[in-house]
């Protein structure tokens, strides 16, 4: 294991952010896409067991496997990322935290995950995919922000198809998405025999509409969906609810 106190070279516009859990830190580029609450909430929703092999598809700078390494007993993470700059930051963050024995970062396309990895080789897959459909109105579809937010490089069907291919029978797929695409998401998951089993809607305030949905699907699972109690982010403007503080680890 690499000494987490070893020197990590930072590039222009990069910074080291404290994740405030287990002394974990992450390298981010202020000019590129930085992780948001959706990724953190997914790490609080995912249920991983000791001995599980987990793949995070579209890992960005590695926030999901880094946080899950502290929140779960799972000790075998693979992080797949198509953007080389993001993958490089993820690798350096893994080294910064001394997690080389737990997290492996792989350069690659979500659309090719089923050929990069062996079929049925993972117990769990996590994904925080691009939410917005297509490239309409994008001035620069090749930018890091556009790739993270819009389906420029892959569609949700690509995500579901490849998650299903690399998951073992009974393996779990955990994702976070937007409620306005919920009908499409459910149909697509079922198409690839990823049976939705748990769902949680996330509301900014108790009297607002939901703006995120967390879903657990099981490869080849039987039809039965549990809708969990909603997650409310703010109790009042600028103040998180106790559940959010718990998920963040404050």
Image (spheres, rainbow, N blue to C red):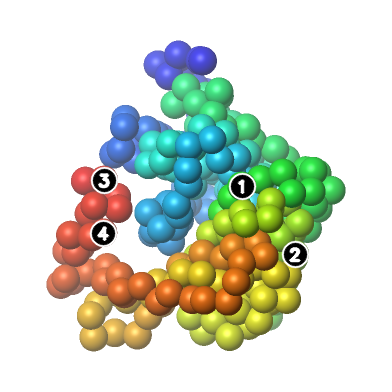
Image quarter for residue 54? top right
Dot 4, crowdedness within 10 Å: few (<14), some or many (≥20)? many
Residue depicted at x 37% and y 42%:
71
**Mark whose residue sits in front, 3 or 1:** 1
The residue under label 1 is 123
Tell me which label, 4 or 3, sits earlier in the chain. Answer: 4
Tell me which label, 3 or 1, sits earlier in the chain. Answer: 1
Residue depicted at x 24% and y 52%:
246
Asked if 227 appears above or below 33 in the picture, the reply is below
* Distance (Cα) linking label 2 and label 4: 31 Å
SS state under label 3: loop
Residue 240 lies left or right of residue 204; in this view the side is left
* Distance (Cα) linking label 4 and label 1: 27 Å
Residue 212 in sight from this viewpoint: no
Q: Can you give x and y, in whole percent of width and height, for residue 134 in the image?
A: 70, 76
Residue 194 lies left or right of residue 4; in this view the side is right
- All told, the count of numbered labels is 4
């Amino acid at each position: 294991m690499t000494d987490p106190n070893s020197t990590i070279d930072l590039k222009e516009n990069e910074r080291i952010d404290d994740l405030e859990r287990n002394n974990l830190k992450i390298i981010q580029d202020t000019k590129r896409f930085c992780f948001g609450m959706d990724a953190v909430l997914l790490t609080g929703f995912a249920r991983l067991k000791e001995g599980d092999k987990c793949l995070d598809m579209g890992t960005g700078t590695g926030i999901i496997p880094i946080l899950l390494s502290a929140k779960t007993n799972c000790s075998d993470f693979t992080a797949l990322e198509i953007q080389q700059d993001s993958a490089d930051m993820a690798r350096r963050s893994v080294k910064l935290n001394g997690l080389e024995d737990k997290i492996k970062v792989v350069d690659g396309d979500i659309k090719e995950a089923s050929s990069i990895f062996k079929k049925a080789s993972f117990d769990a897959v996590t994904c925080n995919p691009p939410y917005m459909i297509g490239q309409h109105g994008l001035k620069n579809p090749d930018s890091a922000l556009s790739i993270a937010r819009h389906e420029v490089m892959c569609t949700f069907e690509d995500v579901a198809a490849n998650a299903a291919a690399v998951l073992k029978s009974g393996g779990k797929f955990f994702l976070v998405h937007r409620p306005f695409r919920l009908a499409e998401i459910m149909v697509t998951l079922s198409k690839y025999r990823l049976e939705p089993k748990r769902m949680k809607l996330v509301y900014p305030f108790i009297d607002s509409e939901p703006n995120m949905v967390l879903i657990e699907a099981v490869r080849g699972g039987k039809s039965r969906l549990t809708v969990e109690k909603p997650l409310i982010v703010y109790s009042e403007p600028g103040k998180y609810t106790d559940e959010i503080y718990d998920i963040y680890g404050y």
